[in-house]
């Protein structure tokens, strides 16, 4: 791996590093148990173990299979492989036309947690192929409701030059997708000078993707 120090190219060094990390992990686990604590990694491991063991789905998994009908996941661009596997276990028993729904929201351009095992390629994988046992309908949104057009245009111009021209999600490379400003700057300026209260503005959209 190009991210490893050059000294780790030696097989003996790699073995020693692996043994050291394994011992450190065991010591951390012992320390957490003694203090009756649980970190986020341990929580995810135990949640996954609670759904499947060497014999297959556990009683807990079968119990929740009939009760979990809808999954809503935010910041999906920062999903890790272990989290992805956990979601797959939760939906393992789902079948087509059973009324279950899987709803995930994310922006791959905002994926910043690779140092915590986030894998933005999972987002691209689900976008292209859906989720195991769950077909997905991808909807790409571009409407920006937060900022006026000059600011949105400035951001589009700046970040379009910083992001790669093509995506390579396996390496964390995501191409830029521009936003479209929805604020009517002139109407907003007129409204601000004519009244102290902000009036509601109705805006129509050409399709459901823009409205979403």
Image (tube, grey):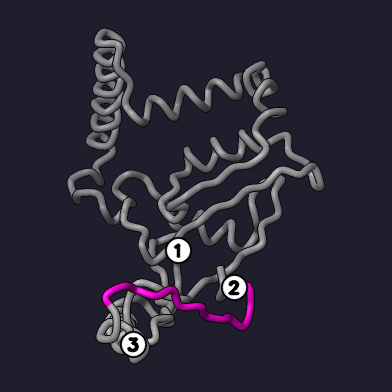
Task: In the displayed orientation, state which residue is furthest to the right.
Answer: 97
Q: Point out residue 38 in the picture as x, y percentages from the top left corner.
A: 33, 21
Outermost residue on the bottom side: it is 186
Question: What range of the chain is rendered magenta?
Answer: 196-209
- Is 188 on the left or on the right of 179, as rendered? left
Bin the neighbour count of mark 1 within 10 Å (Cα to Cα): few under 14, some 14-19, many 20 and up: some
Q: Are marks 1 and 3 in contact (CB under 8 Å)?
A: no
Q: Does the magenta stretch include residue 207?
A: yes
- Note whether residue 157 is visible: no
Q: Is residue 142 above or below residue 48?
A: below
Give the residue at mark 2: 209
The span from disc 2 to disc 1 (Cα, nearest Å) is 24 Å
Q: In which quarter of the image is residue 198?
A: bottom left
Magenta segment's dominant SS is: loop
Classify 43 as above or below 202.
Answer: above
* Label located before the other in sequence (2 or 3): 3
For marks 2 and 1, the one nearer the N-term is 1
Asked whether residue 185 is in view, the answer is: yes
Please, is residue 103 above or below residue 146 in the view?
above
For the point 29% across and 31% down, which residue is it?
A: 18
Q: Nearer the viewer, residue 17 or 199?
A: 199
- Label drawn at residue 185: 3
Q: Mark 1 points at which residue?
A: 169
């Amino acid at each position: 791996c190009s991210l490893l120090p050059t000294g780790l190219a030696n097989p003996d060094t790699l073995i020693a590093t692996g043994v050291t990390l394994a011992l450190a992990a065991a010591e951390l686990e012992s320390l957490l148990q003694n203090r009756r604590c649980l970190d986020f990694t341990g929580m995810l491991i135990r949640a996954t173990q609670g759904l499947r063991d060497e014999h297959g789905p556990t009683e807990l998994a079968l119990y929740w299979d009939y009760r979990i009908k809808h999954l809503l996941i935010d910041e999906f661009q920062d999903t890790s492989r272990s989290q992805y596997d956990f979601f797959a276990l939760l939906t393992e028993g789902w079948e087509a036309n059973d009324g279950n729904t899987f709803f995930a929201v994310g922006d791959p351009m905002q994926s910043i947690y690779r140092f915590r095992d986030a894998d933005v390629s999972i987002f691209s994988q689900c976008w292209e192929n859906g989720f195991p046992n769950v077909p997905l309908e991808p909807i790409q949104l571009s409407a920006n409701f937060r900022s006026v057009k000059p600011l949105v245009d400035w951001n589009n111009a700046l970040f379009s030059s910083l992001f790669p021209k093509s995506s390579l999600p396996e390496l964390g490379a995501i191409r830029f997708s521009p936003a479209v400003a929805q604020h009517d700057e002139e109407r907003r300026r007129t409204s601000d000078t004519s009244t102290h209260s902000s009036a509601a503005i109705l805006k129509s959209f050409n399709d459901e993707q823009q409205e979403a």
